[in-house]
Amino acid sequence: MKKLINRFRELNNHRQRVAHGLWVPETEGGYVSYTARTSLKGASYKRQADALEKLAEEALSLRNDLSVELTGIGIYFQDVDDH
């Protein structure tokens, strides 16, 4: 369970950048500039469209792993390729 919580925390760090960053979607595959409140250090991120797809996959994986941990039964998601 501790490993799952750490994965959720790491995903939340990305969520903060995605939700609170300044986005320029037409530039370099989606460009975001974000300053963390905890460090006040600014950073810029390029090619965010690809990164968001990977983060979405991680969120689905976390949801499934949490379900397995709590109930012993996973929540299985249909892949895009299955359509």
Image: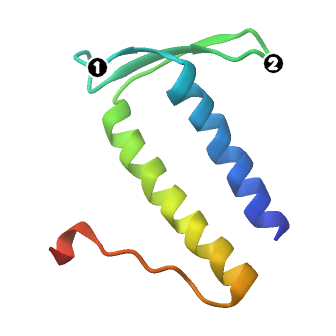
Instruction: Check disc 2 and report its element: helix, strand or loop.
Output: loop
Question: Horizontal and vertical percent for residue 69?
Answer: 73, 80
- Taking the image as shown, residue 81 lies to the left or right of residue 23, namely left
Q: Which residue is mark 1?
A: 25
Q: Is residue 80 above or below residue 71?
A: above
Q: Quadrant of residue 28?
A: top left
For badge 2, the amino acid type reads Thr
User: Label for residue 72?
Assistant: none
Q: Quadrant of residue 27?
A: top left
Q: CA distance from mark 1 to mark 2?
A: 26 Å
Name the residue: 60% across, 64% down: 62
Instruction: Check disc 1 and report its element: helix, strand or loop.
Output: loop
Q: Is residue 49 above or below residue 29?
A: below
Image quadrant occupied by the C terminus: bottom left
Name the residue: 68% across, 45% down: 10
Q: In this figure, what is the number of numbered marks? A: 2
Q: Which residue is mark 2?
A: 38
Q: Residue furthest left?
A: 83
Near-viewer residue (66 or 36): 66
Q: Is residue 75 above or below residue 7?
A: below
Q: Earlier in the sequence, mark 1 or mark 2?
A: 1
Q: Residue furthest bottom?
A: 72
For badge 1, the amino acid type reads Pro
Count residues near mark 1 (Cα–Cα under 10 Å), then give few for <14, some for 14-19, many for 20+: some
Count residues near mark 2 (Cα–Cα under 10 Å), then give few for <14, some for 14-19, many for 20+: few
Name the residue: 51% across, 58% down: 58
